[in-house]
Amino acid sequence: MKKLLLGLLLCMTFVVGAQPLPLNDFVKFGDYLDIQLSPDGLHMLARLRTNNRVVLVVVRAADGEIVGGITPNNNDIIHTASWVSNERYVYEFAEKQVYNEAPIPQGELYAGNIDGSLGKLLYGYRASDQGTGSRINYKSDDRASQDILNVLEHDPDNILIIEYPWSKDGQYWYDARTKQPDISLLNIYTGKKKKLETLPYGGARAIATNTGEVKFISWKDEQNVSHAAYREKQDQPWKSLKEAFNIETALIPFAMSDDGNKAYFVGDVGDKEVQTVYELNLHTGEYLQLFDGMQTDIVDWIYDAKTRAPVVALSYPSKHQYHYSSATSQTAEVHKMLATAFEGQEVLIKGTSHDGNFILFRVSSDINPGEYYVFDYKNKDAKFLWANRSWIDPQQMRPMQTVQFKTSDGLVINGYLTMPLQKETTQKVPLVVMLHGGPRARDYWGYDNEVQMFANNGYAVLQVNFRGSSGYGDVFTHAGNQLWGSKIIDDVLQATHWATENTAIDGAKMCVYGASFGGYAALMAAVKEPGLFKCAIGYAGIYDLNYMYTESDISDLWGGPAYLEDALGHDQQQLNDFSPINHVDKITAAVMLIHGEKDRRVRVINAEKMAEKLTAKGKKVTSMNFGLSAHGVYDEKSKLKLYEALIEFLNSHIAPAKS
């Protein structure tokens, strides 16, 4: 394994170019999007981007030969794909629409065999047999989205699905997840469907055994509170976890063991209420915490190949941290081996054959966009498959440093700092403070196209996981509630000062940039400390918080009004005070506003009204609207146009010193 890693490193180019790379290198979509191993480990199913299309290819694992696949028509893409047996797979298209640049999934499910035979539209609004001349209609026109609950390994013809009926808004149908879902059997050869039951709660999720018994459901009520319930048999009523197992802790089920005797849940632990994983024995009612030692939420896990129990988990206090359960597991043993061989990079097992002998895994880091390998357990040998974004040379990317500081009110804030190439470590460089959306989201250590694009063009990048971010426990997340324009912005400003005082940042050359909530925070930071930033860039940003209630689809979502009440509140004076549109007279930074005209989450009226106010005050504003973009630009040509303008704007205000 170490020889393999050394060989790969020796093959890499170590020459760092003095000139910036083409912007298109950071704009282009990844070429290998995801890969899945067949149950017997003999084939792989990969979504591959080529010629501006996402196609599906079937690859023979033994020699890497492409033996089958699907190429969509027009500008459609393969949206999802998964194995349902050793020979058969199912997939979904996302279709290009005239009114939106991003392809949109239609809820339809198709199937095919490795050899290209028995292709079939199984499910969706165009799946009906009517019009074929037959009086017998086995399939229906389903205006719904479906998820596979279980592939039912012992039933070669059927899979278990959950169906989410669509809602209609004018002439458009959409998946609002507010209606009660159905549980159905779906034949993977004919598309014949048998409805088994309707779940009692809108948008509910279900967990089923390998024999198709739905044992657990979870849902959120209109107040955005999560619930879970259990039943032993289908003809029995649903019971809360307290009723069924005397469990007081709020747990949400996500999987069951291969034998159906145990269930797995996410739930909080400790004073910070960080997320971990629990195991429940259905026979004894005993439940235990599988992983410990977390400083931050567990956000991903790896299942044992044979028992389907989570045996490896990942959290991100700064870089990735692995946690191993106490269970004896070949999968965990292999992961430890791989983590040692690829030390310093993140290793995720993405799939295993049923016998555990073949393991598909992905390796990535802050400078590596991701590589796929297959590990042969018997021979203890790893074979390189593909590199995502194969045109990126990791040696030309810049490492992401972890940073931490304490705020004036004693809260510990984490983040990341990426420095451009410097002649000397003391050379002062301009800074882009790049703020994430949400705010209930977070930045992670890992490869980021935007970060590397800025660094490659001579800019340092500071990312701040301010209070209100997710991933650091519920207490930290809720610490940002109704403090959008005060404490959260204070965290951003204090992080910026920390960077100027402790690193080689040129405090006279700084710009703040963000998307969605990050766009809001960027403009609000420019309001709160005028003169700190030479420029502020808002991308799909909210600039009047009142629009969150009147000009956003959040209020139409299940639990949306409750979220707004929790996160923002209804104090009218505070909403006005926390809205940058009401403080344009304080902004001294040059402003750039970027927005998609099809954005339903944050409507373009935000950018339009903000630009009007700035212009009325005699302040210069650079505006870029994209007619077919929604909440973010999707199309590569549009992205290239956006980033060319972004770099030009930065260069005109905080350009790096010429070398």
Image: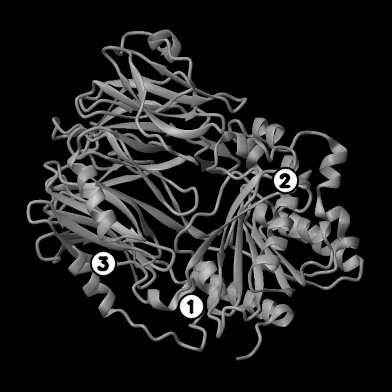
Identify the residue at horizontal 31%, vertical 27% (top origin): 184
Q: CA distance from mark 1 to mark 2?
A: 34 Å
Q: Which residue is mark 3?
A: 386
Disc 3 to disc 2, how far (Cα)? 44 Å
**Disc 2 packing (10 Å; few <14; some 14–19; many ≥20):** some
Image location of residue 489, percent across then percent down: 74, 52
Which of the 4 image quadrants contains residue 160?
Answer: top left
Q: Is residue 447 left or right of residue 139?
A: right
Residue 614 placed where, x, y %? 85, 65
Name the residue tied to disc 2: 551
Q: Residues within 10 Å of mark 1 (few under 14, many from 20)?
A: some
In this rendering, the answer to whether 407 lies above or below 297 is below
Task: Tell me the kind of residue under disc 3.
Answer: Trp
Residue at disc 3, secondary structure: strand
- Relative to 458, is 575 on the left or the right? right
Q: 431 and 606: which one is in front?
A: 431
Q: How many marks?
A: 3
Q: Amino acid at mark 2?
A: Glu
| Residue 111 visible (yes or no) | no
Q: Earlier in the sequence, mark 3 or mark 2?
A: 3
In this view, 151 is above or below 444: above
x, y percentage for residue 188?
21, 39
Q: Nearer the viewer, mark 3 or mark 2?
A: 3
**Which numbered disc, 1 or 3, marks the residue that appears first in the sequence?**
1
Is 580 positioned to the left or the right of 37 in the image?
right
Q: Quadrant of the C terminus?
A: bottom right
Q: Mark 1 near mark 2, Cβ–Cβ under 8 Å?
A: no
